[in-house]
């Protein structure tokens, strides 16, 4: 190889110095979560799967009419995801538990944007179209969106959907947490207002955690001792209580670290003081210098094999 | 019945008279402006009016309740001497303005209080707590404690709508008795179809059917599986009385969309 002992030590010294420098300059990642956001607590032991939340969501957000009526509960036979025409959907899961009448006990799970405290979509958005508001909502501003759909890739809950059917003015579609209704009109989110059994409790997030803990404490047989969303991905504004393990309900186990923490730490430490481009181009320069040196040497004492290959390539071209 | 006096007979005659007089009027003048007059004679039960009035009342909110277990509660009711017999009304109309503030998709439930009490024979099943205030009634109404949802000062107190639904449906499910679907208790408030129907001035019959099917597609599909659609058989009134033509909506009859 063209790298001699002296060069090797030179490069190592440069690399070592830059790494040491980067560690000093990289400041610790800080959460930008709102201090006292609103939230919703979904109690899956209460949900009766009536799909009224879907209906209210459709009406409140003026979404397109569904193919099948909201009263059609046969839709629950199939697992669905929130999409560009429905911000929220209810799925039915059966754990295999059977009640007194030999009927499978269903658990209904409402899905929507979780409105993370430190949202990955906001971190991934390069146009600042997505922002985390003080009231807890992860807000989408269509006028800023450039349609890169990074948010869809970033979301750990796979929530944002895209209007692929609209080639001119497509939007990213996801639950708005009824931002305008809650912030300006001082109303409840559409789904929380219509829910007939208060499966959705609306309130301040910190109060909801207390409520959730109290419900578990008061009725330990009914609930599993876990508030989904309290710590997942650094906490979410929407949280769940359940009597069935969350992994069986399509609510996957997620790390407690906020999603943007790792990505932003890497990115910020890479670009602090622009050390990484400097190192990169320095390295490239070094490689150029070294390879030039090598080709010179190769040219001087040329081996027959290289020449033959070159001839062959030339013929082909 | 305890009373079959002249009062009852009078109301029945009044009702009959109402029906007799209102029907021809309705048939003659179907426009809403004209039917306003016979509406006066539409008879309603006197207890219905009372129930409606009662449903409109909003009682003061009970801040604190006596925290006691189910058995203590049952014992207390027994000690006080309250039982199923101590009921003033046979039914209630669950039509509180607290709920109607946000909800108008379904009509109010007519809750048969006496019947439910008679079947369960346990007041504490629904009257699960009493106000902490000693002077208050032992069995207060649901809406005394359950009012607006998500009360900040009482985070665990259910709103009135949720309290009704959880109590009714939970018990129906547990006892395997009574409806647990929406229409089992509520009449649906059907939206005014005047605004929903999009038809030209003089539509063809097929256009009308397709307009209905625009929203009621499953109803149309169900119709295709019903006897109304599937009937067919030999007709005695066909060409040369040969009885060989299969008649039926789905085959060659008219009016088969």
Image (cartoon, coloured by chain):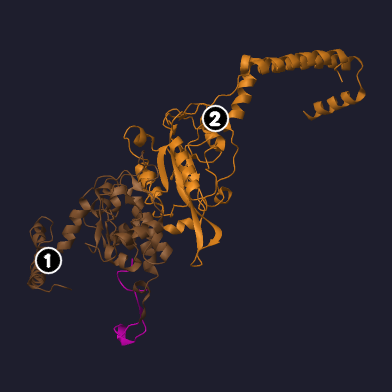
Chain colours: A orange, B brown
Q: Give the percent coordinates (x, y) of residue A108.
A: 48, 53
Residue at the image point whose x is 7% and y is 70% from the top: B10
Front in this rendered view, residue A116 or A155: A116
Q: Which residue occupies the foreground of this view, A25 or A161?
A: A25
Q: Nearer the viewer, residue B125 or B208?
A: B125
Residue A238 picture location, percent across and down: 47, 40
Q: Is most of the magenta stretch helix, strand or loop?
A: loop
Q: Is residue A189 above or below residue A143?
A: below
- Does the segment drawn in magenta span residue B245? yes
Q: Which residues are magenta?
A: B234-257
Q: How many marks?
A: 2
Residue A71 image-quadrant placement: bottom left
Give the labeled residue for mark 1: B27
* 1 or 2: mark nearer the eye: 2
Return the x and y of residue A52 as percentages of the image width and height. Answer: 38, 51
Left or right: A296 in relation to A105: right
Chain ID at mark 1: B
Q: Is residue B103 visible?
A: no
Real-space CA distance between mark 1 and mark 2, rounded to the nearest whole angstrom: 68 Å
Q: What residue did someone put label 2 on?
A: A124
Q: Residues within 10 Å of mark 1 (few under 14, many from 20)?
A: few
Compared with residue A159, is residue A4 higher up or lower down, i.e. above or below? above
In the figure, is residue B78 to the left or right of A40? left
């Amino acid at each position: 190889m063209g790298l001699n002992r002296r060069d090797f030590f030179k490069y190592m010294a440069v690399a070592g110095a830059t790494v040491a420098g980067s560690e000093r300059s990289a400041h610790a990642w800080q959460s930008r979560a709102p201090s006292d956001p609103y939230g919703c607590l979904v109690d899956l032991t209460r949900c009766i799967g009536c799909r009224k939340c879907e209906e209210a969501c459709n009406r409140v957000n003026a979404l397109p009419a569904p193919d099948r009526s909201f009263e059609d509960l046969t839709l629950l036979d199939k697992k669905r995801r929130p999409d560009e025409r429905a911000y929220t959907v209810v799925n039915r899961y059966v754990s295999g538990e059977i009640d007194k009448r030999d009927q499978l006990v269903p658990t209904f799970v409402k899905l929507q944007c979780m409105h993370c405290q430190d949202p990955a979509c906001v971190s991934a958005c390069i146009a600042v179209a997505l922002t985390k508001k003080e009231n807890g909502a992860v807000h989408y501003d269509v006028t800023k969106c450039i349609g890169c759909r990074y948010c869809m890739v970033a979301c750990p809950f796979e929530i944002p959907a895209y209007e692929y059917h609209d080639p001119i003015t497509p939007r990213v579609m996801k639950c708005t947490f009824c931002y305008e209704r809650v912030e300006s009109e001082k109303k409840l989110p559409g789904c929380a207002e219509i829910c007939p059994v208060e499966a959705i409790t609306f309130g301040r997030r910190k109060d909801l955690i207390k409520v959730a803990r109290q419900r578990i404490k008061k009725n330990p047989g009914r609930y599993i001792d876990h508030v989904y969303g309290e710590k997942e991905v650094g906490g979410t504004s929407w949280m769940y209580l359940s009597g069935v393990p969350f992994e069986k309900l399509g609510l996957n186990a997620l790390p407690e670290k906020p999603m943007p923490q790792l990505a932003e730490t890497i990115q910020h430490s890479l670009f602090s003081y622009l050390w990484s481009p400097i190192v990169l181009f320095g390295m490239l320069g070094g490689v150029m210098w070294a390879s030039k040196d090598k080709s010179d040497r190769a040219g001087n004492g040329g081996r027959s094999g290289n020449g033959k290959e070159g001839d062959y390539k030339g013929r082909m071209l | 019945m305890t009373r079959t006096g002249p009062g009852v007979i009078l109301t029945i005659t009044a009702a009959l008279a109402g029906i007799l007089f209102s029907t021809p009027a309705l048939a003659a003048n179907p426009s809403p402006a004209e039917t306003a007059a016979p509406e006066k004679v539409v008879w309603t039960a006197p207890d219905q009016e009372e129930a409606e009035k009662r449903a409109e009342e909003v009682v003061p909110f009970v801040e604190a309740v006596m925290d006691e277990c189910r058995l203590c509660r049952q014992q207390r009711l027994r000690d006080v001497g309250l039982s199923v017999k101590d009921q003033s009304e046979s039914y209630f109309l669950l039509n509180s303005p607290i709920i109607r503030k946000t909800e108008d998709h379904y009509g109010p439930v007519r809750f048969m209080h006496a019947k439910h009490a008679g079947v369960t024979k346990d007041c504490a099943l629904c009257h699960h707590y009493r106000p902490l205030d000693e002077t208050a009634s032992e069995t207060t109404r649901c809406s005394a404690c359950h009012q607006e949802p998500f009360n900040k000062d009482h985070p665990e107190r259910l709103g009135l709508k949720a309290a009704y639904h959880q109590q009714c449906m939970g018990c129906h499910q547990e006892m395997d008795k009574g409806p647990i679907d929406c229409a089992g208790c509520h009449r649906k408030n059907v939206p005014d179809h005047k605004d929903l129907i999009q038809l030209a001035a003089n539509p063809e019959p097929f256009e009308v059917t397709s307009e209905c099917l625009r929203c009621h597609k499953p109803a149309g599909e169900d119709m295709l599986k019903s006897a109304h659609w599937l009937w067919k058989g030999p007709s005695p009134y066909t060409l040369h009385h040969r009885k060989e033509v299969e008649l039926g909506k789905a085959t060659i009859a008219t009016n088969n969309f």
